[in-house]
Amino acid sequence: MQIFGIPIFPEQASTFAKDVDALYFFIIATSAFFAIGVAVAVIYFGIRYRRSHDNQIGARIEGNLPLELLWSVIPTIIAMVMFGWGASVFYHLRRPPDEAMHIYAVGKQWMWKFQHLEGQREINELHIPAGRPIRVTISSEDVIHSLYFPAFRTKIDAIPGRYTELWFDAQTPGEYHIFCAEYCGTNHSGMIGTVTVMEPSQYQAWLQGGGMEGTLAQRGARLFNDLACATCHLDTGQGRGPSLKDIMGTTVELTDGSSAIVDEAYLRESILNSQAKIVKGFQPLMPTFQGLVSEENLVALIEHVKSLSPNATPAAPAAAPAPGATPATTPTGTRPSGAAPPAAAAAEKK
């Protein structure tokens, strides 16, 4: 959007950009209307009913019930309209379609790292197809960041120790900005990037020109074996750790009598802090991998475990422990990393 040739707002490049802008302008217009109205009334009454001499006393006013009800009811109705409209837009922004294409993003001082399920990895660049919903799962390696796509009218914080997510459906091919919208240190202003929206055929051609490391799940499988996870997590369920086959989306019983749903946050916690939740029937033998597995390798491991549950229904990542707490991790003997010796895990640290 431009005024007199000056860009005021980013281009509306996603399906819900117009909805966000409409709500924004409605709130701005309503606020401006009442602010101007109050200012004009104050000035008018200040002039119209000013005291003309020092001994003048104003008339006694007892009140006006209809007027008082009017200025209470009307703002309440307007506020409820804003709330209902805002809640509807927010709900849409936070409910990605089941068929959305999944991408992982990691914030790190001072860059954005993106990983496609097909195996492509990018830094400060993101290539996506036009006309297809994109779900981005975000984490941080250090401090709080905020992944912001101005043209898509969506952003969300990247928080250490947990997963967050956003989604969008870019309709117009082109290049758009990526920013970090949370001050994250000295070079915060340089934590920028570009998202390139491509025609589907062009995007497929771009995918074919990617690296030769295989898919993200295949890279996770290699890491799973390198860390000796497979020695404990047997498909038969007879290993020292529980079987990971078809585990995604299921509910597991823990030794403390509680239960947990196996999702991305649960897998993350079980890898990084294997003593946090112990699956019933297994001993706390699995070592912790906190500080030994990078964020990029962590999502590769998670995708490998998800690939072992082909029939699982995709679920939004649940919140892991609060920032500052041990990054989401796993019950001993419950998640992807097996009882691999720390030395093996250290070899994968990046």
Image (spheres, helix red, strand yellow):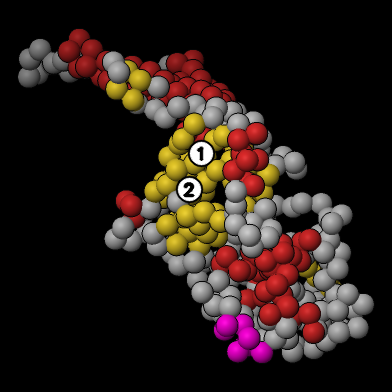
Mark 1–mark 2 CB contact (< 8 Å)? yes
Distance of mark 1 from mark 2, alpha carbons? 8 Å
| Residue visible at 60% across and 48% down in the picture | 209
User: Residue at image x 45%, y 27%?
Assistant: 11
| Residue located at (56% from left, 56% from top) | 121
Q: Is residue 185 above or below residue 5?
A: below
On the image, the x and y values in percent for residue 259 come to 80, 70
Q: Position of residue 248 (x, y in %)?
A: 80, 62
For residue 292: magenta? Answer: no
Residue 292 visible from this viewpoint? yes
Stretch of the chain drawn in magenta: 341-347
Q: Nearer the viewer, residue 42 or 313?
A: 313
Q: Tag 1, which secondary structure?
A: strand
Task: Kindly identify which residue carries mark 1.
Answer: 196
Amino acid carrying label 2: it is Glu
Residue at image x 13%, y 16%?
51
Q: Position of residue 316 (x, y in %)?
A: 70, 52
Whether residue 68 is visible, yes or no, is no
Q: In this picture, is 100 found above or below 78?
A: below
Residue that mark 2 sits on: 125
